[in-house]
Image: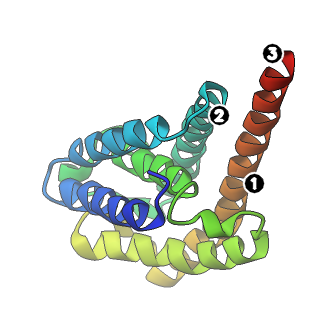
């Protein structure tokens, strides 16, 4: 889904499925929605090399997200109510959100390419807002104080968002050079 409006709508539908599903005791709902989105997204990428690199990017984003959110959990900044737990220390639906964030960089957020400072600012503001929304919906708990949690999450996403943009850039650049090499070889 490279069309920005469709990508934007799918992003929010999947985000809501992750958060609301976890809050309602259906923590598998969001990852399922994200998997469907990712399957459609990858099918829109015409080159097999580019598709492979994007799939690798999404897997790396999921792994990085698992590690980052696990640090937040282990440090007491982030907790999950019993009905939202599926995995430990972080949850599978939180990993799905990181994969979703990386995927949407090719669609609705493609305007962030090569704008690392803007990505950092967006991460610093949007990261805490997303976690606060998740808490308000009942999918997560922030602590030890709200201020400490917001500062920690803002710091995390100030770094994470430019890194995701950089990873997306590398995946696209590598796929484009590989595609050019394949054309040259023919």
Residue 144 at x, y = what percent? 45, 72
Residue hosting label 3: 186
Residue 163 at x, y = what percent? 72, 56
Residue at x 58% of width, y 32% of height = 51
For the residues labelled 2 and 3, the Cα–Cα distance comes to 18 Å
The mark closer to the camera, 2 or 1, is 2
Tell me the tag on residue 166: 1
Among the two numbered marks 2 and 3 on one chain, the one whose residue lies closer to the N terminus? 2
Q: Is residue 53 above or below residue 135?
A: above
Name the one closer to the observer, 146 or 165: 165
Q: Left or right of 77: which side holds 173?
A: right
The mark closer to the camera, 2 or 3, is 3
Q: Quick one: label 1, few (<14), some, or many (20+) residues within 10 Å?
A: some
* Tag 2 secondary structure: helix
Residue hosting label 2: 50
Q: Left or right of 156: which side holds 132?
A: left
Instruction: Single out the residue that lies furthest toward the top.
Output: 186
Residue at x 75% of width, y 54% of height = 166
């Amino acid at each position: 889904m490279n069309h920005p409006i469709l990508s934007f709508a799918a992003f929010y539908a999947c985000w809501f499925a992750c958060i609301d599903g976890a809050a309602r005791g259906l923590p598998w709902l969001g990852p399922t929605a994200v998997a469907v989105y990712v399957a459609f997204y990858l099918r829109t990428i015409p080159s097999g090399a580019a598709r492979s690199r994007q799939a690798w990017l999404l897997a790396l984003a999921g792994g990085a997200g698992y590690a980052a959110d696990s640090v937040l959990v282990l440090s007491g900044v982030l907790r999950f109510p019993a009905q939202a737990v599926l995995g430990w220390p972080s949850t599978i639906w939180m990993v799905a959100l990181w994969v979703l964030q990386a995927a949407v960089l090719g669609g609705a957020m493609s305007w962030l390419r090569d704008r690392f400072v803007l990505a950092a600012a967006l991460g610093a503001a949007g990261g805490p807002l997303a976690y606060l929304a998740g808490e308000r919906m009942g999918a997560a708990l922030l602590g030890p104080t709200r201020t400490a949690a917001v500062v920690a999450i803002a710091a995390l996403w100030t770094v994470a968002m430019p890194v995701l943009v950089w990873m997306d850039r590398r995946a696209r650049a590598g796929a484009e050079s590989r595609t050019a090499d394949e054309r040259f070889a023919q």
